[in-house]
Image (tube, grey):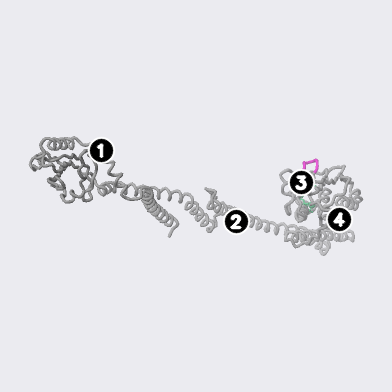
Amino acid sequence: MSIKMRFLLSYVGVILFSITLLLAAGFLIIFAITGDVKSIEHLYKKTYVQKPLTTVEESVFLDLKLFAKNNPKQLLNEKELKRIEQEDIEIVVRKGTKVEYASPALDKQALVKSLPGFEETNINTRDTIKINDYFFTYVKFDFYFPDKSKGSVFVLRKASSYAELIRGLFPILSGLLLFLLIMVIGILNYLVSRSIIKPISILKEGAERIKSGDLNFEIKAISNDEIGQLNRAFEEMRTKLKESINLQIRYEENRKELLTNISHDLKTPITSIIGYVEGIQDGVANTPQKIEKYLSTVYSKAKDMDSLIDELFLFSKLDLKKEPFHFETVELDKYMRDYVEELYLDLLQQGIHIELHFLNKQIYVIADREKLKRVLANLINNCVKYMTKDRKNISIALNERLRDVVVQVTDNGQGIEPSALPHIFERFYRAEQSRNSQTGGSGLGLAIAKQIIVEHGGEIWATSEIGKGTTLFFSLKKGEKK
Ligand SMILES: Nc1ncnc2c1ncn2[C@@H]1O[C@H](COP(=O)(O)OP(=O)(O)OP(=O)(O)O)[C@@H](O)[C@H]1O
Ligand SMILES: [Mg+2]
C-alpha cells in the first residue's frame, strides 16, 4: 500500500472516530447537565409553545370559545363542529374524561391519555403534547356544561415530530458532513503530500539519476523537518560523490601526465648519453681531450638522471605516505643558523649574499630535521637557479604567530608570472615552458617541499613580483622547549 493511501485511510479513520466521540461526548454532557434525556424533548417543546397562534387557529379557537361560553350544547353537535373545523386544524371536545368529539385524524384513545386535565382558571392554556409519537401544539379552554360536568375544547395543530425534523434535516446534515469530510481529507492530503510525498519523490528521482550516472542536478530541501534534513543529507551525499568522482578523474589525468613527464625527463638525458657514447664508438671523438669531454658529459647526464630518479622516488614515497617522518622539537633559530653557516661559503663563491632576520629569542617547532633540510635546500636552490641580478641577495626571516612559526625565504631574482604563481607547487610544473638544460630541474622541488610541509601540518605559499624577486613562506607548528 502506498504512503498516500495509508495517510488517506488514517485520516478517514481519525475523522470518523472523532465524530463518533464527539456525538457520544455531546450526549454525555447533556445527560450530565440535565440528568435525563427527556430535557431535549422539553427544549424542543418550548420552541413551539412560544410561537404565536396562526389566524386560522385563532378564529377556530374563538368560535369554540364562543360556543363554550354561550351555548355549550352546540359543542356536542358534530355538524356544527365539522363546520368550524379547518384544514390542518384539529378540534377536540371533552366532557368529563370522555372525548366527545375529535377530528378524524386524531386517535381518540391516545387523546384521553395525552390531553391535559381540566383547569378552572384557564391559566395554562397553551402547550405542546405528544400523541403517538407526534407533537401537537394546542390551545385549550375549560368551562362547565349546563349539567355541571367539566368541559374542555382544544384546537390542535400538528407540529413536525422529532423524527420528522431530523429526517428532514438528515440529507442536508449528512451532505454537509460528507462535504466537510471530503474537504478536510483533501486539505490534509494536500498538506501531507506537499510536505512528505513530494520531497520523497524528489529523492527517488534523484536516486534514479545517480543510479544512471548523472550527478549534475540539485536536490532542494523544501522544509526544515526530518524529510528536509533527509533531502539535505542526500544532496550532501550527491556533492561528495561528485567531488570524489571529479577527483578520481583528476587523479587519472595526473597519472597520465606524470607518466608522460617522467618518460620525457628520462628520455632526454638518455638520448644524449646514447649520442655521446655512439660518438665515442664511431670515432667522432678522436682525441683524448674530446673523449674526456664526451665522457664527462655522459657522466653529468647520468648524474642528472640519477638525481631525477631520486627526486621521483622521494616524491612518490611522500605521495603514497610511505616516507617515514621523525618529528622532534627543534630550536628553529639555532637550526637555521647552523644550516646557513654550512651554505654560506658555497653561496658566497657564487656571489650570493645570504642574511638572516631572526627575533632575539629561541623559537621551538615540531619538525623532522632531515626533511626540513630538504625543504630549505629546494627553496634556496630555486633562489640560486632563478637569480638574474648582479647583486644577488637571499634573506631568511622567522615570524612567530600564535600557534606556529612562519619561515620566509626571499630572493631578488627574476620573479614569477602571476599566472604561473598558483601552479608552482604542482609536480613537474615549471614556469618557463622551454625546459632548458641550463636551469635544469624537473619541476618537483616545490612539490616535494609542499608534501613535506603538509606532512608537518603546516602550509606553504609564495608571493612574487616579476623582475623584483620572490618570497616563499612556510609555517611550522610551535613546539615546547624540552
Ligand atoms: N625563487 C624563484 N624565482 C623564480 N621562479 C621560481 C622560484 N622558485 C620557483 N620558481 C618557478 O617555479 C617552478 C617550479 O619550481 P620547482 O622548484 O618545483 O621546480 P624546478 O626548480 O623547475 O625543478 P627542481 O626543483 O625539481 O629541480 C620553477 O620552474 C620556476 O619557474
Ligand atoms: Mg626547484
Q: Where are the magenta residues, as a range?
A: 463-469
Question: Which residue in the structure is indicated by mark 1?
Answer: 51
| Residue at 20%, 50% in the rendered image | 113
- 4 and 2 marks in contact (CB < 8 Å): no
Q: Is residue 33 left or right of residue 202?
A: left
- Work out how far the residue at label 2 is from the one at label 1, CA to CA, in angstroms: 81 Å
**Which dot marks residue 462?**
3
Would residue 475 be seen by someone viewing this image from the given angle?
Answer: yes
Q: Earlier in the sequence, mark 3 or mark 4?
A: 3
Circle 4: element type: loop
* Residue labelled with disc 4: 482
Q: Determine whether the beta carbon of the residue marked 3 sits less than 8 angstroms from the nearest atom of ligand 1.
A: yes
Of residues 195 and 299, the one drawn nearer to the viewer in this rendering: 195
Q: Nearer the viewer, residue 191 or 46?
A: 46
Residue density around tag 1, few if under 14, some if 14–19, many if 20 or more, within 10 Å: few
The amino acid at mark 3 is Ala
